[in-house]
Image: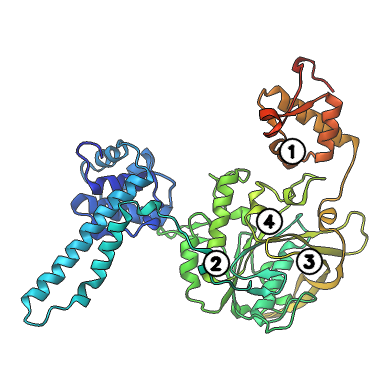
Amino acid sequence: MSEGKTAAEIVLAGILRTPHRIEGYDLDASMFQGRDQDTFVALSEFWEDRRPDTFGPPEIIELASKMGGQNGSVVYLSSLLDYAPVNESQFASYYCQLRERLIKTSLLKKIERQAKSLAEFDLGEIKPELEELERLQKSTGKVGLSLAERISADVKVRAVPWVFPDVLPAYMNTAITGDAGQGKTLVAVDMTARVSRGSPFPVYDRAGPAIKGHVFYITSEGVPEMILVPRLMAAGADLDKITIIEGVYLKSKEFSMFDITQHLPQLEQRARDFPDLKMMVFDPIASFLPERINPNQQNAVRQAMDKISGLAYKLGIAAPTIMHFSKAPGVKAIHRTSGSVQFEASVKMSWSVIRREGDPRNVRLLVPQKSNITGGYKSLEFTICPIEFPAPDNSKEIIRTAKIEYGALVDEDPESLISPPQETDNHVVRASEFLTRKLREGTTLYAVPLIDEAERAGVPKWALYKAKDKLGVEHDKEGHFQGRTFWFKRKPDTLSF
């Protein structure tokens, strides 16, 4: 610790740098005193309201104003930021010091109270403090670095619980992807309606009771009275079992779009009010990422998606997430989803809604794109049917909407259905342009990430290999044929196509 710093100041500095530590550690205002306590309270309130990634000068000024504009607040907060970087090990160590001091204070008060009485000393009353102190001492100040480990033999194995067998698992995040207007939301609405009234999923359903319960439908589509609710009615939903969530109200009563990086704690808290909650739909998932997250940034996307998976597991519910296809043709199915591949990689199961090219029928397919649970699933045909009915409160007003009706199973290769090969000369030209550009960048072109990047850019693998031969690009391996394969051009100044 730098000269003059206290444990409390180190912890506050760590929170300013990484505010999510407020939720990751068992912190309490009683662990601080005086100005440090005021600072922690203000930090906690700011975190609940804004969920910042860190505190820079603008946040520091706003935080100081929330502290009542106390003299020196800005200087004091800024001085905390000037401290040496607070890594996780340092933070955990000083957190333990504060926690230990708080527990010892509670312990001494209990001992003094018992010492003043004439009754026999009760060790049971101070047992919680003693056990907590022992745990902290064993952690040797590295609580934040302890491993979450279990011996495999101690893990109680259980079957995957399903909301719809072979279609929608509970405790997990499932993707529903497809092009705009092909029926992704109608599939989610149909699932929602079935859960609300306790109906099984057609064709795939196995023997067993149907799942019935409440559903949270988180949507950014707007006008639910004209779009979502009429669709739910057409699907036969029990509307009393469906809660539509369009956003959040901040402490200032200002409406804000739902943000999965900030508002899942509020969603979890609300979910606790519905013991029969079985499903939580996110439609579409891209709308619930904040502007600061680039949808193509793999780490940020994976962390956000993992938060949904964690919430689904904690609540024991299914979490269908609606995703859009990219415009890129001819790429692998997992790369069809718009944005980072982590949108698909993070889910345990994924279904794609597609319509065959040139098919004159009004028929779509629900295609199994991915499953980490088991395999062998077949695609399922469905038809979008227009529906009309009078408005419940005005029989003269006609509501026009749609619902889906499922048909037969289709035994075809899912990969070819989702991403049929499209071998055209245009693909080779685009591949040549892509490969030429990458070669001119002067970086080492490792084969695997190069092919992945090309497919995300809409250049299929087969076209990239044709462009490789056309441009005279060679390949080799690092470390005497033991390492990664890379591509190279011996005379980059002659690149042309």
Give the label on residue 377, or none: 3
- Residue 357, how many percent across, how many down? 89, 54
Name the residue that disc number 1 marks: 451
Foreground pick, 263 / 370: 370
3D distance between C-alphas at marks 2 and 3: 24 Å
Q: Quadrant of the N terminus?
A: top left
User: In terms of depth relative to the viewer, which is nearer, 117 or 223?
Assistant: 117
Q: In screen coordinates, is 45 left or right of 345?
A: left
Mark 3 Cα within 10 Å, few/some/many (few <14, many 20+)? some
- The label shown at residue 323 is 4
Residue 64 shown left or right of residue 222 in the figure: left
Q: Looking at this view, is 440 or 127 the one in front?
A: 127
Task: Give the mark nearest the N terminus, 4 or 2.
Answer: 2
The C terminus - image quarter: top right
Query: Do the residues under discs 2 and 1 have CB atoms within 8 angstroms?
Result: no
Residue 195 is situated, as x and y percent measured from the top left of the image, at 66, 77
Q: Is residue 17 left or right of residue 246?
A: left
At label 2, which amino acid type do we have?
Answer: Tyr
- Label 4 or label 3, whichever lies nearer to me, is 3
Name the residue located 71 percent from the left edge and 38 percent from the top edge: 448
Residue 109 locus on image (x, y percent): 14, 68
Does 489 sit above or below residue 102?
Answer: above
Q: Is 409 left, or right, of 134 in this rendering?
A: right
Residue type at mark 3 is Tyr
